Image (cartoon, rainbow, N blue to C red):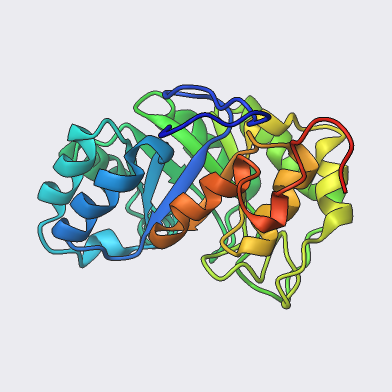
Amino acid sequence: MNYSLKDIPARPEKPRQVGYTMVMDKGLSLREVEDMLSICGDYIDIVKLGWATSYVTPNLKEKLAIYKSAGIPVYFGGTLFEAFIIRDQFEGFRKILDKYGLEYAEVSDGSIEIEHEKKLNFIRQLTEQVTVLSEVGSKDAEKIIPPYQWIELMKTELEAGAWKVIGEARESGNVGLFRSTGEVRSGLVQEILTTIPSDKIIWEAPQKPQQVWFIKLLGANVNLGNIAHDDIVGLETLRLGLRGDTFYQFLKGPKP
């Protein structure tokens, strides 16, 4: 950091297991990636090329090489996985992971219905090849999954070999973990945390009030995902109590 302040919460050094920031790349140019990394590289733990943008992204190999040179892993969004699955092309999906040298993959069923045992088998097979992030929750705002099902899905997907599970919110932050207004389904989150360890979950939280809510609940080193490229520095200041929304969160002693 550029100077010293007291009462700043400790952040683990990269590569870290907690305090994870997953950033969504929705179609950045090569120059935009370079510019982002010049300022935010220390605060990015992993990048998701959103939904199936990797299919239409020009200079994909060059973009991946820029991230790799910065030591930041990349994975393709879960919607691309689902696009392969609905076309019965699972082996084709495995081949593109090798083709592009990816070390991570997301398994999701937010857009299509996949029998859960089949999803678990996909996770088991992919863990032989890459590190798996498994997403739980639907992109359909009308589909409300009760808390006990969230817990069972997360539990079994971790047992199948997922490194971490992702709580669905989309890039908009108005489904899954959140109501259509963007308000956190707080009871759902609290119930999940009775069984699933916080360090095993990445909470998709693209909106600032959602990020603030999770930081106040779980501290500076909560795992957060679907962060926009222009919100990375802002999120880091929220984590450190250096923005109005979390200003008093980590100060010791009496507060005004």
Identify which residue, 43 or 100, lies in the foreground. 43
Seen in the picture, residue 46 relative to 49 is either above or below; the reply is above
Q: Quadrant of residue 137?
A: bottom right
Residue 141 shows up from this direction = yes
Q: Quadrant of residue 17?
A: top right
Instruction: Residue at 89% x, 37% y: name it.
Output: 254
Residue 86 in the image: state x and y as whole percent: 42, 62
Seen in the picture, residue 177 relative to 179 is either above or below; the reply is above
Instruction: Residue at 56% x, 27% y: name it.
Output: 11
Identify which residue, 210 or 202, lies in the foreground. 210
Identify which residue, 166 or 223, lies in the foreground. 223
Residue 38 in the image: state x and y as whole percent: 24, 45
Residue 50 shows up from this direction = no
Instruction: Residue at 56% x, 56% y: name it.
Output: 109
Instruction: Residue at 76% x, 42% y: name it.
Output: 249
Residue 14 in the image: state x and y as whole percent: 42, 24
Seen in the picture, residue 238 relative to 27 is either above or below; the reply is above
Q: Is residue 42 left or right of residue 27?
A: right
Q: How many marks?
A: 0
Look at the image and tell me in which quarter the N terminus lies. Answer: top left
Residue 59 in the image: state x and y as whole percent: 10, 57
Seen in the picture, residue 111 relative to 69 is either above or below; the reply is below
Q: Is residue 61 left or right of residue 236?
A: left
